Image: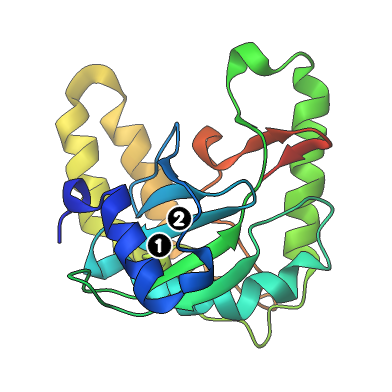
Amino acid sequence: MKKADITPEVVRLLLQEQFPHWAGLPVEPVELDGWDNTTFRLGADMSVRLPSADMYVPQIDKEHRWLPVLASSLPLEIPKPLAKGRPGRGFPRPWSVYRWLEGSHARIDRIGNLTQFAITLADFLTALYAIDGTDGPAAGPHSFSRGGPVAAWDADTRATIASLGDQIDPAATTEVWDAALASTWTSPPVWAHGDVTPSNLLFAKAGLAP
């Protein structure tokens, strides 16, 4: 099933089959949807996320296992898994129900104080990096190799450098990339966010909520 085929009706059918106590709640598309998942608001307090393709399925078990563990050590709210759905009613992948995080996506016109914004985000990432990552999941398909050796992206990076032509300094850029490839991580493992983009940050009532 393609992303465009994942509609509120698909969610309603899945809820009727697997979580009938939520089946009567309204299901609405969110204002800014992601790529990995198709997301809907469920009632006032929940969201439903359905993987948009098979390659995004490994994220589900990771999130249900580790988000509750990380939450207690972080200064800001993060998504809280509430239930895990299974394939059904024509939808071929597992899916999830989460607690709804209220807020507006980060945009430059919404940031009144860039310095405080940077400090709040840095404090969150610092706290994330400080959590013991010894037993955490190593980089792999669930993270698209983010957090692991950058060699996994060597071919894509070199192709991108070549495609940009004279928009950048290809020699200098390649030199930096080669230095990254030659580097080795020798410290203990740490947790990494992997995708700190504006669409993954919310301005909530209490502040920024990645």
Give coordinates of residue 49: x percent, y percent: 43, 58
Give me the disc on residue 150: 1
User: At label 1, which amino acid type do we have?
Assistant: Val
Question: In this rendering, would 189 be left or right of 150?
Answer: right
- The residue carrying mark 2 is 180
Question: In this rendering, would 198 be left or right of 33?
Answer: right
Is residue 197 or residue 8 the one in the foreground? 8
Is residue 54 or residue 89 the one in the foreground? 89
Give coordinates of residue 73: x percent, y percent: 83, 66
> What's the CA distance linking mark 1 and mark 2?
7 Å
Vertical position of residue 28 compared to residue 145: above or below: above
User: At label 2, which amino acid type do we have?
Assistant: Ala
Number of numbered discs present?
Answer: 2
Whether residue 51 is visible to the viewer of this picture, yes or no, is: no
Quarter of the image for residue 112 reads top right
Is residue 76 or residue 187 the one in the foreground? 76
Quarter of the image for residue 161 reads top left
Give me the disc on residue 166: none
Whether residue 210 is visible to the viewer of this picture, yes or no, is: yes
Q: CB atoms at circles 1 and 2 under 8 Å apart? A: yes
Vertical position of residue 179 compared to residue 145: above or below: above
Give coordinates of residue 13: x percent, y percent: 30, 64
Is residue 166 or residue 48 the one in the foreground? 48
Q: Residue furthest front?
A: 24
Mark 1 residue crowding within 10 angstroms, few (<14) / some (14–19) / many (20+):
some
